Amino acid sequence: MLTAVAGPGHPLDWHLHLVWLLVVLALIAGYLWLTSASGSEPRSPATARQRFLFVTGAVLLGASVTWPLGDLAAHWLLIALVLQRLLLMLAVPPLLILGTPRPLLVRLTRPVPVDAVLRVVVRPIPAIAIVTVVAVATLTTGAVSWAARSSVAQVLLELVVLGAGFVLWAPVLHELPGAPKLSALGRGAYLIVQSIVPSFLSIVWIFARHPLYPAFAHPGKVISMSPLLDQQLSGFVAKLGTIAVLWTVAFVVMTRAESADRAGRDSEPMMWSDVERELERADRRERRHGWRDLLPPSQDPS
């Protein structure tokens, strides 16, 4: 059953987002426990930089889905929803991935269902398709109104957007084990496409002649801004924010690769965990083929 959200009062009325607060605290506590160097359990020690990145990502996750930004994004301002989505898709996932030690990433992605998903989303074309579908579907008027009426729907859509953020960065962050090593030019081109295709709705917002989202129809109640102005500013923020982040990362990736080439070194060396993951996948394929060979011809699933 969906939980109804109380009707809007004042834009800055405080609400306790207990579930999200517990999730963020559990995320940080679990990370610190798994990456501590003490104890008898096998751990994956993290550097100070990794801990800073991961905790920063977790804090940004909490800030994006709780008061005040989470409430403004659900009931009051489209521009707040855009800022929330920029954090959930462009900031939180890369910080969490870069902050996780590689041995821990290997353990977390080893289960067969997780690895099966990873093999798909690390490829640029499926990643672009998934991010585009999520970006458009979660910003339809029906989805936005649903999130405004139901706290469960609000959390579900936030989780979907966060998941799309991990998909967006999967082809770029080679920290993920078994990911294909795209060239610097390939990663740069991928990021540029991701900055253009999924954000085409921002053009609609900029040039629309009337507000498109009844959930944000609160004229003058939030910083004396009309819903139409809110919508137009949201279009500019969504487009420019996405381009600024992804194009900057593309520039850094290609610049580092060029510097590595000049220095005569490999900017993306092959890791043993990549080889190990490919061997595990090959072993699973071999076992599947062996199982099929044991079946009578009439029972062969292929």
Image (spheres, rainbow, N blue to C red):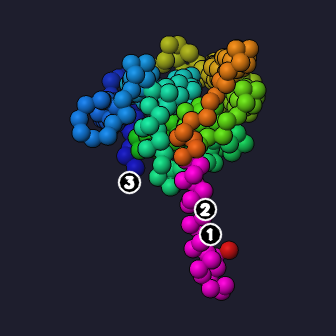
Q: Earlier in the sequence, mark 2 or mark 3?
A: 3
* 299 magenta-colored: yes
Q: Is residue 204 left or right of residue 122?
A: right
Q: Which residue is most to the front?
A: 264
Q: Earlier in the sequence, mark 3 or mark 1?
A: 3
Location of residue 17 (image quadrant): top left
The answer, for residue 178, to whether it is visible in the render is yes
The answer, for residue 77, to whether it is visible in the render is no
Circle 2 residue: 285
Magenta highlight range: 277-301
Quick one: 258 or 263, which is closer to the camera?
263
Q: Position of residue 63 (x, y in %)?
A: 41, 24
Q: Is residue 271 left or right of residue 156?
A: right
Residue at position x 48%, y 45% from top? Answer: 109
> Dots 2 and 1: beta carbons under 8 Å?
yes
Q: CA distance from mark 2 to mark 1?
A: 6 Å
* Quadrant housing the N terminus: bottom left
What's the mark number on residue 1? Answer: 3
What's the mark number on residue 90? Answer: none
Q: CA distance from mark 3 to mark 1?
A: 44 Å
Vertical order, 236 against 281 (above or below): above
**Dot 2 crowding, Cα within 10 Å, few <14, some 14–19, many 20+:** few
The amino acid type of the residue labelled 1 equals His
Residue at position x 57%, y 52% from top? Answer: 279
Quick one: 215 or 62, which is closer to the camera?
62
Say which element carries label 3.
loop
Q: Which residue is most to the left?
A: 39
Vertical order, 161 against 58 (above or below): below
Circle 1 residue: 289
Number of numbered markers: 3
